[in-house]
Amino acid sequence: MWYEIVGTSHVAEESEKRIKAAFKRFEPDVIAVELDSARLYALMHEAKPNYSLSLIKQVGLRGYLFALIGGWLQRKIGKRVNITPGADMLAAVKLSKGKKGLLIDRPLHITLKRLSKAMGWREFKQAVKDVWDGFFHKERVTIDLKKVPDDVLVERLLGEFRQRYPRPYKVLVEERNQYMAKALQRYHTHNPDVKILVVVGAGHAQGLEGLLGEAI
């Protein structure tokens, strides 16, 4: 097999252990990560997110608000578990030193713009309510944030997300899976003899595995 996929959580300390174990076992020539160039730069330089109002023109109001709320939520969860959001991707990037690194995710501003067009205000308001309830009503939280969710839990959560928010699911999960699969397949076509370790969030791992498996 020319690739191996590692599913991670962006705020779980277990993620780095998973990545290092896969790296040692698989001995890849290339490490591909769920990042674009802008997000890589921000992680490498510990840059604060750009939430200036000028961003609204580029990504749309709902995309802007989604980025604002999503960034806030990740930072809050990161503080709970004492992990900087994106530490998993940064760990993978550091392992790629001396090897080839590959950025495979769609540029964030394109995803946010697509989300603005796909998500209606009713869906957006419901999503904000769900985030608020899930974060502040602790009795509803059943996930160990320090661990990467197992495949069964990931599949259940993705199924609920798809059913509750079909259009945002398509933009945030399906379209990005397809984008990343095409990037990997394109690289493999031009470099058929290299082994690629693919590091993505757990929510993308199964879908990406299916797309790459279909292409073999």
Image (cartoon, rainbow, N blue to C red):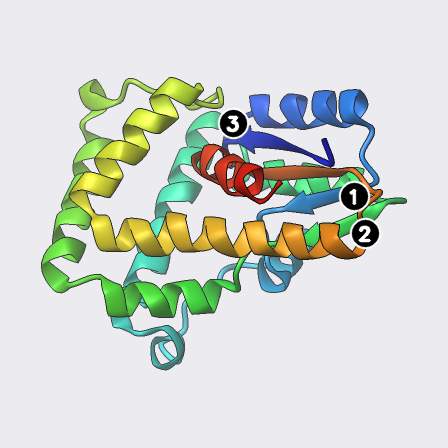
Could you tell which of marks 3 and 2 lies nearer the N-terminus?
3
Q: For the residues carrying marks 3 and 1, which lies nearer the camera in this image?
A: 1
The percent position of residue 83, horizontal first and vertical second, equals 54, 32
The single residue placed furthest to the right in the displayed view is 98
Left or right: residue 214 compared with residue 175: right
- Report, in whole angstroms, how far the alpha carbon at label 3 lies from the one at label 2: 32 Å
Q: Nearer the viewer, residue 119 or 42?
A: 119
For the residue marked with disc 1, what is the amino acid? Val
Q: Quadrant of residue 156?
A: top left
Q: Is residue 187 visible?
A: yes
State the CA–CA distance, disc 2 to disc 1: 10 Å
Given contact means CB atoms under 8 Å apart, are the residues at marks 2 and 1 in contact?
yes
Q: Check residue 12 in the rendering and tell me which mark sits there, or answer none.
A: 3
Q: Residue furthest left?
A: 122
Circle 3 residues within 10 Å: few <14, some 14–19, many ≥20: many
Left or right of 192? Residue 149 is left
Q: Position of residue 114 (x, y in %)?
A: 34, 67
Specify whether residue 46 is in view.
no
Could you tell me which secondary element the residue under label 2 belongs to? loop
Residue name at image x 37 percent, y 73 percent? 59
Q: Which residue is mark 2?
A: 191
